[in-house]
Amino acid sequence: MIDVYPYFAYANDPAHIPLDYALFKSTSPVVVDGNLNYYNLFDAMVDAFNAALEKINMSDIYLSISESGWPSAGNGDDTSIENAKTYNTNLVNHVLETGSPRKPHHRYNTFVFSMFNEDLKQPAGVEQHFGLFYPNMEPVYTIWHDEML
């Protein structure tokens, strides 16, 4: 199980990582690795682990994503409710439809982080704002629809 957070990669280098690439919104490949085309940073990060497993002759191990998400506040415009909803909605749709370029037929079990914002977490910042719900149980935004329930 691996944690995959395109937000942190993007936040650490926004000059070189397009926001659309981090949010699953690229319409053309941003990274091309041989015959593998990467339209989103999530797949690139997952396949970095897959490539490492191949290097140690462990390519038969299937990865699961134990955490992935996008904060809805805490770091300016990049951490908006709109971006968090876009990322998490696109994440769910992506992992339900396909694998990664290196393992296109593998559906990755993926867990969205987190259920609730952690308003008491210190220090204050993005780490407090990954939740789908506020601590009072009101939704920050929704990523599900009736067919998913």
Image (cartoon, rainbow, N blue to C red):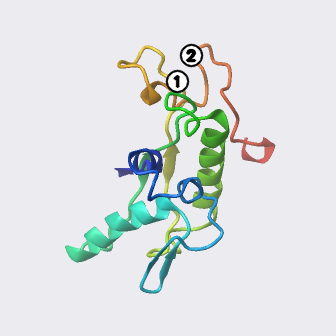
Q: Secondary structure at mark 2?
A: loop
| 34 versus 23 height, above or below | below
Tell me residue 123's x, y (percent): 35, 19
Horizontally, is 71 left or right of 3 in the view? right
In front here: 124 or 45? 124
| 34 versus 29 height, above or below | below
Q: Which residue is mark 2?
A: 135
| 100 versus 92 height, above or below | below
Q: Would you call the spot at circle 1 few (<14 residues within 10 Å), some (14-19), or many (20 or more)?
A: many
Q: Indicate the quadrant where residue 137 lies.
A: top right
- Total tally of numbered discs in the picture: 2
Q: Are marks 1 and 2 in contact (CB under 8 Å)?
A: yes
| Type of amino acid under label 2 | Pro
Residue at left 40%, top 60%? 45
Q: Which residue is mark 1?
A: 117
In front here: 138 or 25? 25
Horizontally, is 113 left or right of 60 in the view? right
Residue at left 46%, top 51%? 14
Marks 1 and 2, how far apart in space? 6 Å
The furthest residue to the front: 15
Q: Which quadrant, please, contains the C terminus?
A: top right
In front here: 106 or 126? 126
Tell me residue 104's x, y (percent): 52, 74
Residue at left 68%, top 41%? 143
| Type of amino acid under label 1 | Asn
Q: Indicate the quadrant where residue 44 lies.
A: bottom left
Q: Earlier along the polypeptide chain: callout 1 or callout 2?
A: 1
Tell me residue 145's x, y (percent): 77, 43
